[in-house]
Amino acid sequence: MVNVLVVGLDNSGKTTIIERLKPRPKQSMEVAPTVGFNVEEVQKGALTFTVFDMSGAGRYRTLWEQYYREADAVIFVVDSGDKLRMVVARDEMEHMLAHPNLRKVPVVFFANKKDLPISLPPAEIAQALGLNDIQDRPWNIFPSNGLTGEGLDRGMDWLAERLGKA
Amino acid sequence: MGSAAAGRIWKGTQKASEHPLLDTPVAICSYISENTAPRLPALAVAAGSHVYIYRNLRPYYKFVLPAENVNTEEQEIWQKVMEGEMVMGDAVAQLTRLQDAGVVLQTRSLQLMNIGDPEAKMAFVEHWQGQPLVATTVITCMDTIKQAIDEPDAVSCLVIGTESGRVLILNPAGTAPVKNIWVGITPAMIAIQGELDVGYRITVAGRDGKLYHIRNGELQQTIIQLEAQPVGLVRLVKHVAVGCMNDVIHAYQPNGTKSWSIYLPCHILAMQRMEVTGQRMTKALLVALSNGEVRVYNEKLLVSVHTVNFPVTALWFGRYGREDNTLLTITKTGMLDIKMLPRTANLEIGALGGGPPPEQEIPLAVPKKTRLYVEQTQREREQAADMHRTFQRDLAKLRLTTARAFVKVLTDGQGAAAFTTSTNLSLSLSVAGLGPRFRLTLLLRNEGARPLLDVPVALRADPSLYALAKAQFTIPLLVPGLQYTYEVAVTAVSPEAGSDAVTVLLLAPAGSHSSAPLLQATLKMPISEPEDL
C-alpha cells in the first residue's frame, strides 16, 4: 500500500493518466477539470497505489503541500506542448522539492501529450525544468500519451521497482 | 499589432492567425458585448475613423464615427469653388480669413491652402469634385467600461476619444453612441472608473497637457494642469496615476486632489495597470523606464523591479492562455516578452521592505470620547472667541493679583512670614508673661551654607499699645547650624486697649543689593493682664 501524489499544472493530463492506469472497464473517456483533489486506488503487480489526484488550477496548488507528508512517491505531469508555461511548472516543482514535509521520495515526470505536433522531447523538458540539478532523490522522465496510455506503464514499472527496493 | 497594418493573433508561443487591416490601428480592446452564454469576447480594433469589431476572429461590425459639424461658410466656399462660381484666389483668401477668425478648418481646406502651385491647386479641387465637405475625425484612444456590474465577464461598452475633442460611449453591440461628451481638447489617453449604469468617472489626458474629468456623462469643472505633457494614464483603486514627461508620476483622487507623487530616475516609456488575481488580489501600477527597468508600484511603494534589455513600447498585464497573471512587454525592437507572476509572489506593501514601519499601523490607545468631551468641544467650537477673551481676562487678573501681592509683601511687610530666596534663615517667635510686661524670645537659626555678618533686626509694634525695650539691634554673626536666642522686653502701654501683633524683620546686611527683608515674622500678642496697682 503506497501513497502516490499526482501533481502538475492545470490541463497537463493528470486525471486522464490516472483514468488510463485503472482497469479498462472502469475507465472513463471524458474528464473534467479537477476541483480540489480525487483519491483513486490502482493495482500494479503486487503493489496497491493510493493515488491522490491533485487539482492543478492555480488556486488549488496550495493544497498540494497538505499531502506531502504522506506521499511515498510523486508523479509530476508536464504538458509537453505548453512551452510557455514550462517556467511555471519548474517554479512549482522547485517549490515542491524544497518543501520540508516532502521526504526524499522518488519522482516520476511524465512528459505528457507527446502526440501533439508541437510537443517537446523529454530531454528538452528535463533541460527546461532543470531536472539534472536534482541530486538528492531518484527521478526519471518518460514521454507519455494520456489518451492512449502509451508510456505510462514504463513510468509505473520504474516507480514500482524503486518502491520495491525501499 | 504589426506595422504593415495587420493584426496578428498569437497562441502560446506560436502565431495562430493574421488579419489584414485597412488602416494603421491606434487601439485594441477585447470586451464582452453580449449577455448570452457562452460569453465570448469581441475584439475591437480602432483604426482611422472606424472601430472594427471582430467576433470569433471574424469581422463582425464596423462602427463609423459620426460626422462632425462643418462650418457653413467653409462648406459654401468649397461648393462655389467646385462649381466654378468662385475663383481660386478668392476661395483661398476667404478660407484664410475664416482661419484668422478662429474657425478650425477641415483638413481638406488646410491642404488646399498649403499647395503653392496654382495648377496643383486646381487639380486638388478637381480631385474632390462632387464630394461635399464633411468633417471627418479619427480615433485617438479607446478603452472599455463595464455596463452594469464590475465582474470579469460582465457586458462592457467601448469608450472612444476622437481627434475632434469628443469622448463617445458606444452601446455594447458597438453600433451607436449612447453618450457623446464634448471635451474641447483632443483626448490623448483615457482612464475609466466605475460602471456606465451605476456611476462612472472618465479621466481624460488632453493634448494640451491637462487632465479633464467626466462624471456620469458631464464634463466637470475640475481641470488639472500638469507640469509636463502626460505620457501615461492609469486608473488605480482610488486614484488616477498620470506619468509626465518630467519623470514624475502623480496620483490624483477623483475630486482632483493630489495624493502622492513618485519621482523616477529616468523617462517613463509606458505605464499600465496590473490587476493580480488569485490568492492576493493586488492592484498595482506598472511603469517601464528608459533605463530598461520595469517597475511595479503598489500605491507609491516599489514592490518589484525587473529589467528588459530593449526600450519598452507597450505593456499589458492580464490572463494569457491558461495563466492568469501574465505580463506582456513589447519592445521597440519588436520583441514580445512574456513574464508570468509566480504564485508565491508578494506585491503587498512592505513585502520588499521600505515604507512605514509596522509600528505605525498599531493604533494608539486613545480613550473614548465622552459626552462631556463632545459637548465641551462643541462649545469650544461655537464660542471660541468668548472663551479666549475670558481666559485672557482671567489670566491678566491673576497676573495683576500676583503682582499686587508681591508689591505688598515688599513694601509694607504685612505678610505672616516672608523671606528672600538668597538666604535660608529660620526664625521662631515666642512670648512669655501675662502682661503687661512680656518677654519676646527670638530663636534664630541660619540654615544656609554661608555665615551672615551684621544682620540688622528691627521690631515693629503699634507704639500706642506696646513699648519695646529695643526697637532694633544688630546680630554680629550668624554661623550656619547654630541656634541663637535673643530676648526683647515688651510692655503693654494700655492693657485695656486690647492686643495687637509685633513684627520682627531681619533686614539685609549693609551693602547688599536688595532692600527687601531677609525674613519677616509676625507674632500675635496675647491679651494683657491689667497692671497690678
Image (cartoon, coloured by chain):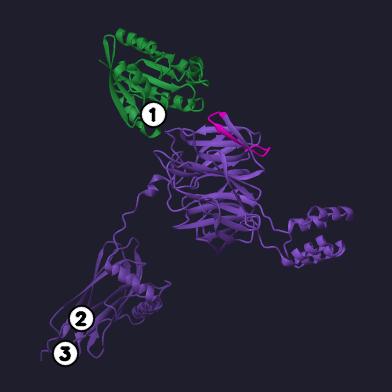
Tell which chain the image draws in green: A
Q: Nearer the viewer, mark 3 or mark 2?
A: 2
The residue carrying pointer 1 sits among few (fewer than 14), some (14 to 19) or many (20 or more) residues within 10 Å by Cα, namely: many
* Label 1 with label 2: CB-CB less than 8 Å: no
Where is mark 3, residue-wise? B495
Q: Chain of mark 2?
A: B
Q: Residue at x 39, y 45 (%)?
A: B358
**CA–CA distance between discs 1 and 3?**
117 Å
Which of the image's four quarters has the N terminus of chain A?
top left
Question: Which amino acid, by three-letter code, is at mark 1?
Answer: Gly
Q: Earlier in the sequence, mark 3 or mark 2?
A: 3
Vertical comparison of A114 with B517: above or below: above
The span shown in magenta is: B1-14
B5 left or right, relative to B511? right
In the drawing, what numbered circle is on residue A56? 1
Q: Find residue B466 and report its horizontal and vertical position in percent.
A: 22, 87
Q: Is residue B131 found inside the magenta-colored segment of the image?
A: no
Task: Mark 3 vs mark 2: tell me if same chain.
Answer: yes
Q: Find residue B281 and report its horizontal and vertical position in percent.
A: 42, 42
Secondary-structure class at tag 3: helix
**CA–CA distance between discs 3 and 2?**
15 Å
Where is mark 2, residue-wise? B524
Colour of chain B, in one word, is: purple
Quarter location, residue B486: bottom left
Q: Residue at x 31, y 7 (%)?
A: A165
